Structures are given as C-alpha cells and as structure tokens.
Image (cartoon, coloured by chain):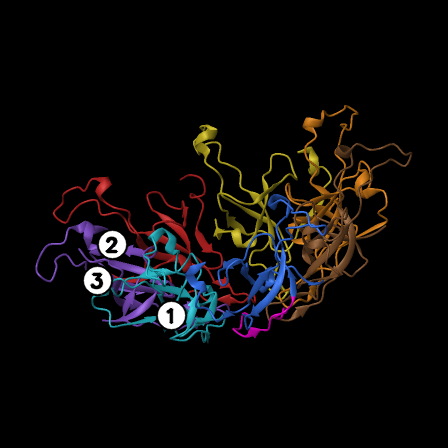
Chain colours: A orange, B yellow, C red, D purple, E brown, F cyan, G blue
Amino acid sequence: MAKTAAAIKKLMPMFDRVLVLRAEAVTKTKGGIVIPEKSQGKVLHGTVVAVGPGARNQNGEIVPPQVAVGDNVLLPEYGGTKVEIEENKEYHLFRETDILAKLEM
Amino acid sequence: MAKTAAAIKKLMPMFDRVLVLRAEAVTKTKGGIVIPEKSQGKVLHGTVVAVGPGARNQNGEIVPPQVAVGDNVLLPEYGGTKVEIEENKEYHLFRETDILAKLEM
Amino acid sequence: MAKTAAAIKKLMPMFDRVLVLRAEAVTKTKGGIVIPEKSQGKVLHGTVVAVGPGARNQNGEIVPPQVAVGDNVLLPEYGGTKVEIEENKEYHLFRETDILAKLEM
Amino acid sequence: MAKTAAAIKKLMPMFDRVLVLRAEAVTKTKGGIVIPEKSQGKVLHGTVVAVGPGARNQNGEIVPPQVAVGDNVLLPEYGGTKVEIEENKEYHLFRETDILAKLEM
Amino acid sequence: MAKTAAAIKKLMPMFDRVLVLRAEAVTKTKGGIVIPEKSQGKVLHGTVVAVGPGARNQNGEIVPPQVAVGDNVLLPEYGGTKVEIEENKEYHLFRETDILAKLEM
Amino acid sequence: MAKTAAAIKKLMPMFDRVLVLRAEAVTKTKGGIVIPEKSQGKVLHGTVVAVGPGARNQNGEIVPPQVAVGDNVLLPEYGGTKVEIEENKEYHLFRETDILAKLEM
Amino acid sequence: MAKTAAAIKKLMPMFDRVLVLRAEAVTKTKGGIVIPEKSQGKVLHGTVVAVGPGARNQNGEIVPPQVAVGDNVLLPEYGGTKVEIEENKEYHLFRETDILAKLEM
C-alpha cells in the first residue's frame, strides 16, 4: 500500500482508461451472520471515479468515452490493473471497452 | 448469486454487448417423464433482454445493433459472459457479432 | 435434437452467416450395393437455405452477400457451426467468406 | 471421389478463389524409363480452370483478380484446398494471393 | 552502467516513446525505521523527463502525445525498456499508450 | 529439378513478389584454395531477375514495387520460396518488403 | 565475414530500414585497465550510416523517416538484422520504428 499511495491527490487516467472503485464484498448476511470469505464471491461491480479523455481513433482523434464519474459498472472477471491509492479500497483501471455494462442499483 | 445480483435494477450493456436470458432446459418430456440432466443438452437459444447502443466503427462512430429486445436468438456454444442477476436464471452478455441467428419460434 | 429444434419455425442468420443444408451421403452405389459408412466420405456440399443481410464493412455499412437461397455450395472440410433444427438433417452455419464455391449440378 | 464429384457440372469459386488443375507428374523420362514415385517430386504448377469474381476490399468493393482461365501458374508447396471433381485429376482451390507466379511454358 | 551512460548529454525519444525517471523506493518509514527491501514494493510511478514527437497515424501523420515533461505518471508493472543513463537512477522508455494515468501528488 | 523446371520459359511473379537469383557461394579463396563448404557461409545476396506488378493497397490499387530487374539485393536469412527453374541455380521468390537493401557491388 | 562483404560498395536500405554501425564496446577503463569481456556490457547505441526512403502507409505512399545519416541512436536489446560488410564492425539493419531514441553525446 505504501508504494504509490501516500502522496496521490488526483489520478487522471490516460486515453480510454477508467478508474473504478470496486464495491465491497458483502461479508455478513442481512441477518448479521458472517459469510466465510470463500463464500463471498468476487465482487464484479464498482463505481467509476475517474475517466480518461478517450482513446484515439485511427486518425489520431480523441473519441469521448461512454462512461462518466459516478456510473455503477459491471466489470469483467479478468483484466484491469489494480492501483493502490487508499488502504483497504480496491481501485482498478480498465479500458472503457472492457467494461461490460452500466448498472442501476 | 449474492454478489452483484441483489441490488441490480437495470443493466445497460456497453457498446455492442447484448444481454440474453437463456431459455430453460427442457427437463421433462411432453409425456411428463423427467429427462436426466445429462440428456437435456445445452440450451443454445434465448431472449434478448437488453442491447447496448452499438460498437464504434474505426472512425469512432456508433453502429446501431441488429438485434432488439425481445428477439429470440441462437447462441454460440462457447463465448459470452455469465452475469448473475436473478436466481436460477441464466443471463449472458454476448457481443452482437457472436450471435448466430435470430429465431422465429 | 430436442434442444432447440422443436420450436424453430424460421432461422434468420446474423450478418454474413449462411445456413446450409448439407447434402446426404451416398449410402448405396447406383447398382444398389450398400457403401460401408467408412467409405462414404464426408459430404462437402449442400444447399443454401437462409442468408444473413451481410457483414458490416469498416464503416459499419452492410455488404450484401454473394450467395442466395437455393445455391449449391462447396463447403470447407472444417469450420462452420452445426445447428440442430430437424432430425437427421445436417444444418450448418458458415460465414459467407468460408464458402469455397458455388456449384452447378 | 464419389463424394461430390459425380454431379458437378460447373464450379464457380467464391471471391478471390482460383481453381487450379495441377499438372501431372512426369512419371517417365524422355527416354521412356519409369521414374519411381519417390523421385518424381511434387508438381507445383498447374492451369487455372476457374476464377472467382475477386475479393472484397475494405469498403466491400470487389477487386478483380489478376489471373485468368488458362493461365499457367506456380503454386505454393502448402496451402490450397483439394477439390474432388474428376477421377485422377488434382483440382485445388487457392486464394489468388497465394499463387506465386504466372508461367510461360 | 558504463555502457551507454557516460557520454549521453540528451536523449530524444523516437515517435510516441516517453522517458520516465522512476521515483525512488521508500526505504525508511516516516519514523525512520529502515524498511526491508522485500517490503518496499515495486515503485510504479515516476516523472516524465523526455517525450517523443508522437506516433504516426495510419496516414503517416504525427499525432502529438498527451504527456509532457514534468508530468507525474502511473506506470504499468511490466513493459517499458530500461535505459542506463545515470548511476542509481531508473530511467525507462514507455510507449505513450502504456502509461496508465497522470498523477497529482 | 525435373519438376517444374524443364518447360518454364518465363516466370512472372504475382503481386509484390520478386524473383531473385542467389549469388553463388565463393568456393575458393582468391589464392585458389578450396574453401570447405561449412566455411563458405550462406550467400545472402543476389540479383533480381523478375518483379511482379506490385501489391494491392487497402483500396485494391496496385502499388508499384521499389526494386527492378538487375538490382543487387540483400536477402533475409529466412523466408522466401525456393523455385526450381534451372539446374544448379538458386532462384527464390521474396515479397518485396522482405528484401533488406539494394547493394552496389 | 567473407560472404557478402568483400564486394559491397554501397548499401541502400529498403523502405523504413536503417543501417546502424554499433559503437564499439569500451574495453579499457579510463585508467587503462582492461575490462573483462563479461563486464563490458552490450553496446546499445550506434551511428546511422544509411536510411531507406521510408515505409509505405496504407495508401502505398512513402512516409519519410525521422532519422538521418550521422544520428546517434539508442537501439533495442533484441531485434535488428546483423549485416556483414566490414571486418570487426557491427552493422545492423533496424526498422525505423524499432529505434528507441536519438542521442546527443
């Protein structure tokens, strides 16, 4: 965590990269029973916290992205780059085209 | 199932992704005899329940998709991403170009 | 066979996909002698029974296909996706560009 | 041979495919001595007997081929699809771009 | 270190390459305790010290880069080419598109 | 050698292919001493003897080649297709883009 | 060395290839101590001695190169084709895009 995290005030993704804060795993049932970690499943959705200006098309022009800060998004199981910004928070950078869907929750 | 499912009210696929609800396997013959799971075969068709705005072409323009909500579609045996939205329902995200055919049933 | 088949009334291939009904293997010689299955060879031609609207070019425009329903076509030995529509009939979906030739028979 | 062959009256290659009748191996020396099969070498030239309308370019337009029926052509050692049309004749389908050269003989 | 280093006065990256001076690993805690090397983690950010003129697009035109000298950047864990310019300094060349994000620190 | 060779009067390469006659290995030193085959090295240059009309660009237009008959060219160590035209002569077909350089000798 | 070298008067690289004369390894310290070969490191810079006219873009037009004869360049550790022109000189052909940077020394 110490690596890069301490000093980062703001992260501006390059091109079509999108910074997503992964939702936290549900660790207790509604009734309050602790769910063993193995049964919690991998959390595959999160909230967009930063968006790059967009990828370049083949002419070198910027193509604006289709997600915005605050969007709830469905994430692929694999891919993305973990970024260590804040302790105990899972930040990941995804290419816009890897994001599967937007969610209303 | 618990992971993402509980809270999702609406899922809007990104780009040319299509959300398909797979048809349920036939588990009994018309005569009422239970078909053993092994003999049921893999269900390879389903109903489109959500469609993205379309992929971008090489100029970054959106190309409208050729399937619509409610279409019955023939699915490839492999590919697609399983999405857990509702218990006992098989939702999958496919790229539009992976869908083999539309079906009238 | 039971899987998808029973209910399909019509299959409309997506993009440049072409539905081909493979010709039946010759199982007897003209003289009436039964040819052992091993010697029958793989049947590599068939009849086009449905054609998609065409693939998209790089601008997202539809390119009309060059085969039509009723065409006799020569098929590649590998490739194509088997589709179960009718019992004892071999239906396959091919991309238009995988079809080797049209045949006059 | 029986497979597809018997009934084919005409074969029209799709896109940029070219049907080539491979030249027969020289099985005797000029002096009449039989050359053992092992020493005959692989025949790598033949005569074009049918040409498709041409491949599509990236805009979906047909690009006319650069070989014509009757051309003697040099063939690559690998590639091409064997087609069974006539007994004891070696017909192969090649993409136009796989043909190495035209020959004057 | 001796290899290339001694004589280099200036390095001008080609195309969309970017020369980054990697930040130094934190080797002591704020309290002054030495962190064992194993626990220091890999430093994944740095400062841009030189930028190429930009990559060519498909028409051969130069596309200006989106990072500038002095930018703090987040680097991918793998990729990049180590360049030996100065002793005990970690210089790496990255393609602009491999840089994950700009950072305010 | 017998295969294709005997009858070829002229070979016209297709597209951007170039027919090169490889230079003969130096088998004796200037002083007349025979160099053992192992020490002769692989001859990697030759003379262009035939040039195709040029490759097609993405619009299907012919792009004229940049080598001409008579050019001395430097060849890559691997790649190219050996063609048997004349006994004891090494003819090879290369794509124009595989030729490394022209040589003045 | 004997192979191609003796007779070459001039080498004109094809397309975007660049002929680089690799700098000689430092074999002695400034103080005159011989550095063992193992410690000399791989020399990764050199001088451009010949430049091709440039690669073709997708329309078949020549794109002028961005290095010139006399440039000091930083080379990738792998890639490039060794060319034997002069004894004890390391000449290598690189694609322009493989050259990492220009150097002022």
Q: Residues within 10 Å of mark 1 (few under 14, many from 20)?
A: many
Residue at 44%, 48% (x, y): give it: C8
Q: Are marks 1 and 2 in contact (CB under 8 Å)?
A: no
Dividing the picture into quadrants, the one containing residue F91 is bottom left
Magenta segment includes C61: no
Return the residue at label 2. D4
| Quarter that holds the C terminus of chain D | bottom left
Q: Which residue is mark 3?
A: D23
Question: Mark 1 belongs to which subunit?
Answer: F
Q: Magenta residues, as a range?
A: G56-71
Q: Secondary structure at mark 3?
A: loop
**Label 1 with label 3: CB-CB less than 8 Å:** no
Q: Amino acid at mark 1?
A: Thr
Q: Amino acid at mark 2?
A: Thr
- Numbered disc 3: what chain? D
Under tag 2, what secondary structure?
A: helix
Note whether residue B72 is visible.
yes
Q: How far across and down, in percent of the image, does residue B87 sit?
A: 64, 34
Q: Name the chain letter of the residue that bears numbered label 2.
A: D
Badge 2 local density, few (<14 within 10 Å), some, or many (20+)?
many
Task: Name the residue located 14 percent from the left edge and 43 percent from the top edge.
Answer: C33
Left or right: F26 as drawn, with respect to B61: left
Q: Which residue corresponds to mark 1?
A: F47
Between marks 1 and 3, how big is the CA–CA gap? 29 Å
